């Protein structure tokens, strides 16, 4: 008889008690770009259940077999991370969790596990990822977790908790990122969420910036800062890639994220897939013109200057990694 598998997708606190939302993975469609869309698409209440946190912690793993380390992707916003994830899935060799919100809930000190319960955060993160990895192993696939761009604030702790895992970092030139964020602002930018989460951008000028544009700039600056720190710490195996090189580095990224177990060709890369809503195969990615990005860069040159400096510094690190220098 096949063992019933239940996997975590959310954590919550009621009073002084912690609980876990679980889903039956055999009843969900992971072709969506984001885990939240996968969960929302399943309407059958029998596909879900809730367990007390401590009871869930004590549940045994679904397999005793040795598992391949989980690949992790951290990135700035609008850098092609979802495109990479969908290409990995299209190879039929990967299961990719797209920006699972439970990771941020676990690690953020003001969310589920405040400071007195900090040790529970690492336990929750390790078991959550391990459970998903064990299920992926049973499907004979490699698990990769693509974290959201805000989750990069927890990078150092995650590198500590998953020290045997490969961490890939994706970056992109800042004017293209901010132009995209302003043209189609996500909720956390539009509503200026988590203002204390992002670092202030150093600037020598007294220029006044549009509040939302500045918030987007802070998001970019913070992500790039944390990625640079993550590379500097050398706590985990690392791979850094620029958006413009995703297609050329696809095979190398797939091999890196699978610890060398998956070998696919660059020719399998499809640059037109997108998946912001609905199934990824139904939508196409349309590239924004260079003229539009250039116009945005000219209008926001004061804000972009320190971000461009960050970008140039990380591009030097890419060259160092390619040359084998750490």
Image (cartoon, rainbow, N blue to C red):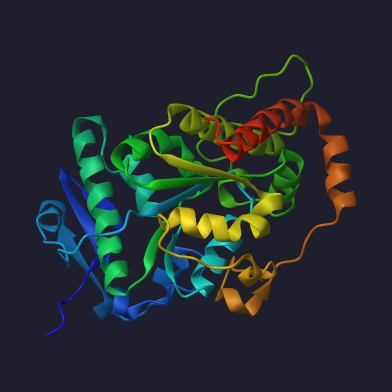
Question: In this view of the protein, which residue sits in the foreground, 306 or 1?
Answer: 1
Quadrant of the drawing holding the N terminus:
bottom left
Tell me the residue at 32%/81% (across/down): 44
Corner quadrant of residue 112:
top left
Question: In this view of the protein, which residue sits in the foreground, 157 or 219?
Answer: 157
Question: In this view of the protein, which residue sits in the foreground, 190 or 90?
Answer: 90
Point out residue 152 in the picture as x, y percentages from the top left corner.
47, 40
- Tell me: 186 left or right of 95: right
Whether residue 262 is visible here, answered yes or no, is yes
- Tell me: 326 left or right of 294: left
- Tell me: 325 left or right of 16: right
Point out residue 305 in the picture as x, y percentages from the top left corner.
77, 27
Question: In this view of the protein, which residue sits in the foreground, 107 or 228?
Answer: 228
Point out residue 322 in the picture as x, y percentages from the top left corner.
60, 40
- Note whether 72 is above or below 279 in the view shown: above
**Tally of numbered tags:** 0
Point out residue 326 in the picture as x, y percentages from the top left corner.
52, 30
- Tell me: 166 left or right of 63: right
Tell me the residue at 45%/36% (across/down): 153
Corner quadrant of residue 269:
bottom right
Tell me the residue at 76%/31% (across/down): 304
Corner quadrant of residue 27:
bottom left
Instruction: Report the residue that reaches farthest toward the front.
Output: 323
- Note whether 280 is above or below 61 in the view shown: below
Whether residue 197 is visible here, answered yes or no, is no
């Amino acid at each position: 008889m096949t063992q019933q598998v239940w996997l975590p997708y959310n954590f919550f606190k009621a009073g002084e008690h912690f609980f876990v939302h679980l889903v039956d993975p055999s009843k969900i469609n992971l072709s969506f770009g984001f885990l939240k869309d996968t969960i929302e698409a399943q309407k059958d209440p029998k596909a879900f259940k809730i367990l007390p946190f401590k009871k869930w912690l004590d549940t045994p793993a679904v397999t005793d077999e040795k598992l391949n380390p989980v690949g992790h992707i951290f990135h700035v916003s609008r850098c092609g991370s979802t495109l990479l994830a969908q290409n990995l899935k299209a190879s039929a060799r990967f299961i990719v969790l797209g920006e699972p919100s439970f990771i941020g809930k676990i690690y953020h000190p003001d969310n589920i596990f405040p400071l007195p319960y900090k040790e529970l955060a690492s336990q929750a993160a390790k078991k959550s990822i391990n459970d998903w990895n064990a299920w992926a192993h049973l499907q004979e696939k490699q698990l990769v977790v693509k974290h959201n761009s805000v989750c990069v604030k927890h990078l150092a702790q995650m590198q500590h908790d998953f020290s045997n895992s490969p961490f890939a970092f994706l970056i992109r030139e800042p004017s293209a990122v901010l132009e995209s964020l302003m043209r189609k602002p996500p909720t956390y930018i539009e509503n200026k969420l988590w203002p204390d989460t992002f670092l202030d951008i150093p600037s020598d000028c007294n220029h006044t910036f549009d509040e939302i544009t500045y918030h987007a700039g802070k998001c970019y600056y913070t992500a790039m800062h944390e990625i640079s720190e993550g590379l500097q710490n050398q706590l985990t195996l690392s791979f850094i890639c620029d958006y413009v090189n995703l297609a050329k580095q696809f095979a190398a990224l797939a091999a890196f994220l699978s610890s060398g177990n998956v070998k696919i060709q660059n020719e399998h890369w499809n640059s037109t897939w997108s998946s912001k809503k609905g199934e990824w195969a139904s939508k196409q990615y349309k590239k924004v013109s260079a003229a539009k990005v250039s116009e945005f860069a000219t209008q926001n040159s004061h804000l972009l200057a320190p971000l461009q400096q960050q970008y140039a510094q990380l591009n030097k690190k890419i060259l160092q990694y390619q040359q084998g220098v750490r």
